[in-house]
Image (cartoon, rainbow, N blue to C red):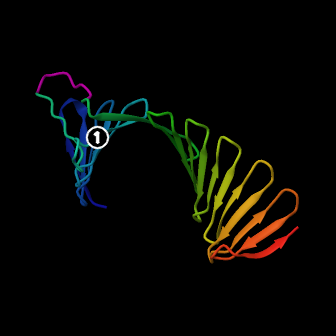
């Protein structure tokens, strides 16, 4: 990718890439501005600051400060702390306490109520609820596992299977007619 570098005042450097992205590396803060207008600031403690769009708008908000004035964060700025780990994974903390961990091959989100969602690279999703229930979603089926050992599975062809902890198995077809009820 071709880029053009320009010297700015106070030892700052700006780089403009051929695809329209511009990166301004200040002494303490790195600002990345893409041709679509999206802006991403990375401050020295690795927090990422992204402006929020104004109410009713789909484009990011803009902030301009007059020359010589102190730069203050606008009221429409969302600060999302991101941690970048040496193994290449990263962690994002949202204001409501939700934590999203992105690493090679999977994404895991932990919500404040204790619910955890893990999405693997192949698209399989595992949801662990705070009440002990667990959902597994794959291309072939969706399964809910209950704490008492009961599992309910719905296959992609519409067939429903319920296995109880007692060993009983109940199978229903698409119209929910019992195909097999084995005790």
Q: Nearer the viewer, residue 178 or 166?
A: 178
* Picture quarter with the N terminus: bottom left
The answer to if 121 sits in the magenta stretch is: no
Is the residue 118 above or below the residue 98 in the image?
below
The answer to which quarter of the image holds residue 77 is: top left
Check disc 1 and report its element: helix, strand or loop: loop
Q: Position of residue 107 (x, y in %)?
A: 56, 52
Is the residue 167 above or below the residue 67 in the image?
below
**Which residue is pictured at 63% across the width and 76% down the height?**
174
Q: Residues within 10 Å of mark 1 (few under 14, many from 20)?
A: many
The answer to if 72 sits in the magenta stretch is: yes
Q: Is residue 167 left or right of residue 4?
A: right
Q: Is residue 28 left or right of residue 102?
A: left
Question: Would you name the residue on which mark 1 appears?
Answer: 52
**Which residue is pictured at 26% across the width and 34% down the height?**
76
Q: Nearer the viewer, residue 11 or 25?
A: 25
Q: Position of residue 104 (x, y in %)?
A: 58, 54
Q: Position of residue 151 (x, y in %)?
A: 75, 59
Q: Nearer the viewer, residue 88 or 159?
A: 159
Q: Is residue 137 left or right of residue 16?
A: right
**Which residue is pictured at 71% across the width and 62% down the height?**
152
* Picture quarter with the C terminus: bottom right
Q: Is residue 65 left or right of residue 96?
A: left
**Which residue is pictured at 57% across the width and 64% down the height?**
123
Looking at the magenta stretch, what is its main secondary structure?
loop
Report how many numbered discs are placed on residues in the image: 1
Q: Position of residue 160 (x, y in %)?
A: 69, 70
Is the residue 73 above or below the residue 21 in the image?
above
Q: Nearer the viewer, residue 156 or 53?
A: 156
Is the residue 78 above or below the residue 104 in the image?
above
- Specify start and end residues of the magenta stretch as a single range: 67-73
């Amino acid at each position: 990718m071709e880029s053009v570098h320009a010297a700015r005042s106070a030892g700052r450097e700006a780089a403009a890439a051929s695809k329209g992205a511009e990166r301004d590396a200040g002494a303490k803060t790195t600002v990345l501005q893409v041709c679509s207008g999206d802006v991403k600031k990375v401050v020295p403690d690795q927090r990422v600051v992204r402006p929020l769009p104004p109410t009713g708008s789909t484009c990011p908000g803009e902030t301009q400060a007059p020359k010589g004035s102190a730069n203050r964060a606008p009221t429409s700025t969302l600060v999302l702390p991101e941690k970048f780990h040496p193994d290449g994974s990263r962690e994002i903390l949202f204001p409501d306490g939700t934590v999203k961990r992105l690493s090679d091959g999977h994404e895991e989100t932990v919500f404040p109520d204790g619910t955890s969602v893990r999405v693997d690279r192949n698209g399989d999703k595992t949801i662990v609820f705070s009440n002990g229930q667990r959902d597994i979603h794959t291309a072939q089926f969706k399964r809910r596992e209950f704490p008492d050992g009961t599992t309910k599975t719905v296959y992609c062809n519409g067939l429903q299977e319920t296995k109880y902890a007692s060993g009983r198995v109940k199978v229903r077809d698409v119209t929910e007619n019992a195909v097999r009820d084995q005790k």
